[in-house]
Image (tube, rainbow, N blue to C red):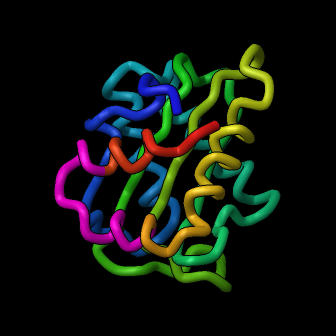
Amino acid sequence: MNELLMAAPFILFDLEAEHQEEVMNALAEKMYQEGRLLDLDGYVEDVKAREAQASTAVGMGVATPHAKSVHVKTPSLAFARLHHPIDWDGKEQVDLVFQIAVPSPGQGDLHLKIISSLFRKMVYPEFLEKLKKVEKPEEVMELVREIKQ
């Protein structure tokens, strides 16, 4: 996966959150601080609108909130490991979150390629177990780099 997508500042460990919006906001804030978003509020609204269409909880304690948005400057992938699982959508408990930001228009189906790459890795329980134990952002980045598109 393109190393430009994920950077250490986009990785949060033991994030305290009670609701999905808190997680999405925290990850978006990190992307915004690093200059990846043009408009923080606009991007967050686009992620929420996408989530309202269908839950991005994918099972195994993972959610992949995302948006193709005119408010995104640079494709980005952020990650949060939550301090405790939260009810994501009334059906799923989530404690690992990959949030994707892709500019629109102009990036085609990049967000789908990223999600597909993540799903191929998530089918291996050891990948998720490693994510739950790593202590450094670089370790997360290394696990994600192992994903082949």
Q: For the point 57% across and 77% down, which residue is it?
A: 60
In this picture, residue 15 sits left or right of residue 65: left
Q: Nearer the viewer, residue 147 or 48?
A: 147
Compared to residue 112, the image places residue 48 above or below, namely: below
Q: Position of residue 75 (x, y in %)?
A: 55, 25
Does the stretch in magenta take in 132?
Answer: yes
Q: For the point 34% across and 40% down, which residue is it?
A: 10
In this picture, residue 77 sits left or right of residue 88: left
In this picture, residue 71 sits left or right of residue 7: right
Which residue, as the protein is rendered here, is positioned at the far left? 135
Does the stretch in magenta take in 90?
Answer: no
Q: Number of marks in the image?
A: 0
Q: For the point 40% across and 32% down, which residue is it?
A: 31
Q: Quadrant of residue 126?
A: bottom left
Span colored in magenta: 128-139
Q: Position of residue 140 (x, y in %)?
A: 32, 50
Which quadrant is home to the C terminus? top right
Q: Quadrant of residue 42?
A: top right
Q: Main secondary structure of the magenta part?
A: helix
Compared to residue 85, the image places residue 63 above or below, namely: above
Q: For the point 26% across and 69% down, which residue is it?
A: 133
Q: Position of residue 24 (x, y in %)?
A: 49, 52
Q: Position of residue 13 (x, y in %)?
A: 25, 59
